[in-house]
Image (cartoon, rainbow, N blue to C red):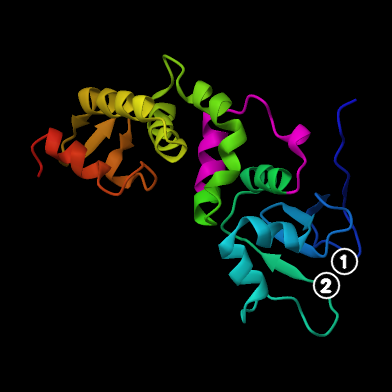
Amino acid sequence: MAAELRTSNANTEAAPSGLTTVDIDPEGDLLIDANSCRFRVCSNALRRQSPVWQQMLFGPWKEAKPTDGSAWIVEFPDDPAYPLRIILFIIHGKFELVPPHPLVISIYNILILAQKYDMIGIARPWCSQWLKAASEFNLPAADVVRSLYIAWELGDEHLFALRLEEISVQARIDSEYRLVYGEDIILEDEIHLGPYDVLDYFRYTYGFA
């Protein structure tokens, strides 16, 4: 029987209106607010997997556990709830709740967050499945660009080279001398493409260097 995840609108500390509490760990000591969700988690699970969270939660910062006995609540306002939820499933060992066939955009967003918190290694067990999704033919242009980043983070040199060539060949220069892929993807505006110099490669291809 598939495992179920308990959700509630109230817990030991009532969630603000509009937030649904998701009990990743029902006995967890930490509440994370991200967009529309409040996640109850184990702080030690976070510290073991991410040196960033280790410093944030157990260092001399405002996110550290309150000393007055009040609820430990940390806000992640810039983190989208869905990829954060998947990451929290993984680091709490709830592997049965990790989607077996996520969309390319979901994989992309999960890896961006994992990189942000210096824990890209948690993706290793799902590498083959996620790379298979990113390697599909006839992906929409946005997913082709996302798959370039996915290939880079997961270490697939063949897929990275394939997407690099595909984007290089099919990109164009618009009237404002910007590199555009697909109908309207401005490559200079893409923050997550892979290595820091990949944009220079595209510029060199079109004689901008």
Say which residue label 2 marks. Answer: 71
Taking depth in this image into account, of 126 and 15 the one nearest to the observer is: 126
For residue 59, which quarter of the picture? bottom right
Magenta segment boundaries in residue numbering: 92-112
* 201 versus 10 height, above or below: above
Image spot of residue 39 (x, y percent): 76, 54
Mark 1 and mark 2: span between their CA atoms? 7 Å
Q: Can residue 18 be seen here? A: no
**Secondary element type, mark 1:** loop
Verify whether residue 119 appears in magenta. Answer: no
Q: Amino acid at mark 1?
A: Glu
Give the mark count: 2
> Residue at 74% of width from left, 36% of height from top?
95
* 44 versus 113 height, above or below: below
Image spot of residue 144 (x, y percent): 39, 27
Give the quadrant of the N terminus.
top right
State yes or no: discs 1 and 2 in contact (Cβ < 8 Å).
Answer: yes
Image spot of residue 89 (x, y percent): 73, 44
Verify whether residue 101 appears in magenta. Answer: yes
Say which residue label 1 marks. Answer: 13
> Residue at 20% of width from left, 37% of height from top?
202
